[in-house]
Amino acid sequence: MTTAFDPADLAGTKLANRLVMAPMTRSRAAEGALPTELTAEYYAQRASAGLIITEGTQPNVNGQGYPFTPGIHSAEQVAAWRVVTDAVHAKGGVIFAQLMHAGRIGHPVLLPGGMTPVGPSPVAAKGQVYTPEGPKDFVTPRELTGDEVRATIADFASAARNAIDAGFDGVELHGAAGYLIQQFLGPVSNQRTDEWGGSVENRIRFAVEVAKAVSAEIGAHRVGLRISPGTNPFNDIQEPEPQPTYAALIEALNPLGLAYLHMIEGADRDLMLAIRKEWQGTFILNPATEGRPTGVEELKLVEDGTADLLAYGALFLANPDLPARLAVGGPFNEADPATFYGGGAEGYTDYPALAG
């Protein structure tokens, strides 16, 4: 029987175990959207994960949706990320950069030079974003032109090359949580009538073309995709009938040979199981846990074959040595949400180690 503590082969990358540190926004980047020495310490402390996936990292200037998030579109950012990847590799870890374009999620005050958030269509999300000036309503995004859509795809590919140059083992494309890739997938956020919208085939096109371009740039074996179909309405994403869209997406992606598919499970377990069945590669699951962090109880999902790898989020924040704790059933430090964002190391790197 395979367990979550067994090694895994991720498209040629050797993982020490099947426990994944999920990507989580930290909002601690320095001026210039640069990761810092604290970033390196944070990820290196968690290098016992089989795979670390970083916080969302914008592939271009206009991709930023939150304050103090890192980018990977400049030479300075590449150099700063190299400090992080070197620190993780020195501890024997494997780390992928999550490439996240926030699309319509954000606000002009977060962007330079009078830029405004962009999206597939001029449809504003309901809700607010935190900014240095306090919470602000999401604005109506500017619709990307056809040429800009293609330029954004090229930006993803360029960012992926930067990630490899920075020492990352691969990249994850953020197609979940209501950000740009999922905005193209959704029939409410995407109301285009050109080749990028309308039919299922057209709405999946952006995700597929990004995956193809990034794979051509760095190799499909270094590329994963994260999705959250239908039942995860984060950032006001609406997918009332997700099954046909994601069935078509999986069918189009399978031939590419991506390193993995990473799914955030919503309320519909049958949908997750259907996607798991159709996906031909490695399947990472961030399981639904009904208001509590993913814990020891979910380890059985690897044992019974529901997932190949299992993603943990909040529990990794408070427990840098999480794999060791899971192996013995705890105890677990309790995460303090008040310390999740903002400056300082408290709640970020300063948690007690496992005794003994």
Image: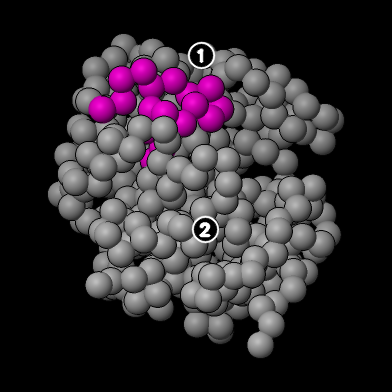
Q: Residue furthest bottom?
A: 356
Q: Is residue 242 left or right of residue 236?
A: left
N-terminal of the pair, mark 2 or mark 1, is 1
Quadrant that contains the N terminus: bottom left
Mark 1 nearby-residue class (10 Å; few <14, some 14–19, many ≥20): some
Query: Magenta span has 158?
Result: no
Q: Is residue 317 left or right of residue 271?
A: right
Image coloring type? one colour
Amino acid on which disc 1 is placed? Pro
Residue at (61, 54) in percent of width and height: 314
Amino acid on which disc 2 is placed? Gly
Question: Residue 294: horizontal and vertical position, in percent?
Answer: 51, 53
Instruction: Name the quadrant containing residue 303.
Output: bottom left
Residue at (35, 76) in percent of width and height: 6
Residue at (61, 39) in percent of width and height: 64
| Residue pointed to by mark 1 | 122
Q: Is residue 15 left or right of residue 104?
A: left
Question: Residue 247: horizontal and vertical position, in percent?
Answer: 21, 33
| Residue pointed to by mark 2 | 295
CA–CA distance in space, label 2 to label 1: 40 Å
Instruction: Name the quadrant containing residue 47.
Output: bottom right
Q: Which residues are magenta?
A: 226-243
Query: Magenta span has 237?
Result: yes
Q: Is residue 234 above or below residue 100?
A: above
Question: In terms of secondary structure, where does tag 2 sit?
Answer: loop
Question: Residue 65: horizontal and vertical position, in percent?
Answer: 63, 36
